[in-house]
């Protein structure tokens, strides 16, 4: 009695399924080559707009990450704080995989002068949920606590006029019953 072989290894079924033909092998090799050479989309921008030198923008440098993995989401709110941190009320969102140590940079083009804020979320284990190991931060670096995770817009707002503006955000993570930067 012959041992059971998977479909692709069974001599009779492989040829009937078209898996043993030279054309199928060539097609499979070509498909693998295209997949391997296709650029990965490491960044998602919604809407898909980029900053232009000399044009109004809010550029943030984010430091103090707890690790080198996970997904980082940066959301721009404004102008004005009427819908600050309301679900889906952001003006622009940038999502990027965290793949190396050091700071991350995000740049948001600005259409009209006003007050804007950026919220950062580090989904450390990439499960799409807020966990104890995830971190966050805001422009203005307002103080957060377990009872006050969402700062007032005024404490996070940055004024953007007709020129590029730069801001720094220090990530904050839960540490026992408090929230703050990892390094002192």
Image (cartoon, rainbow, N blue to C red):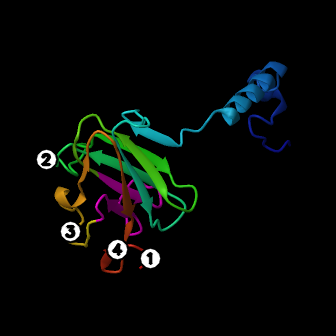
Say the numbered circle drawn on residue 148. Answer: 3
Q: How far apart, in angstroms, are the residues tagged by discs 1 and 3?
A: 21 Å
Looking at the figure, which quarter contains the C terminus? bottom left
Dot placed on the residue nearer the N-terminal end, 1 or 3: 3
Query: Viewer-proximal residue, 67 or 113?
Result: 113
Mark 4 sits on what residue? 180
- Residue at (26, 42) in percent of width and height: 161
Q: Residue furthest left?
A: 82
Residue 107 place in picture, x, y as percent: 41, 45
Mark 2 sits on what residue? 82
Q: Quadrant of residue 19?
A: top right
Residue 172 place in picture, x, y as percent: 36, 68
Query: Viewer-proximal residue, 137 or 109?
Result: 109
Residue 17 place in picture, x, y as percent: 73, 24
- Residue at (48, 55) in percent of width and height: 104
Mark 1 sits on what residue? 183
Label 2 residue SS: loop
50 above or below 26?
below
Could you tell me if the residues under marks 1 and 3 are in contact, i.e. CB atoms within 8 Å?
A: no
27 above or below 145?
above
Label 1 residue SS: loop
């Amino acid at each position: 009695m012959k041992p059971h072989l998977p479909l692709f290894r069974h001599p009779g079924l492989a040829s009937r399924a078209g898996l043993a033909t030279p054309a199928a092998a060539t097609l499979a090799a070509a498909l693998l080559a295209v997949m391997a050479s296709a650029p990965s989309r490491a960044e998602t921008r919604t809407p898909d707009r980029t900053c232009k030198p000399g044009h109004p923008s809010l550029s943030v440098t984010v430091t103090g990450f707890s690790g080198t993995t996970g997904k980082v989401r940066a959301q721009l709110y404004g102008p004005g704080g009427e819908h600050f941190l309301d679900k889906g009320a952001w003006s622009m969102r940038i999502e990027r995989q965290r793949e190396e140590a050091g700071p991350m940079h995000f740049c948001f083009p600005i259409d009209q002068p006003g007050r804007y804020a950026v919220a950062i979320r580090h989904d450390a284990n990439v499960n799409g949920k807020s966990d104890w190991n995830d971190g966050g931060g805001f422009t203005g670096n307002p103080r957060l606590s377990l009872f006050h995770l969402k700062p007032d817009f005024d404490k996070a707002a940055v004024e953007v006029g007709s020129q590029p503006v730069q801001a720094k955000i220090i990530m904050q993570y839960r540490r026992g019953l408090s929230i703050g930067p990892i390094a002192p």
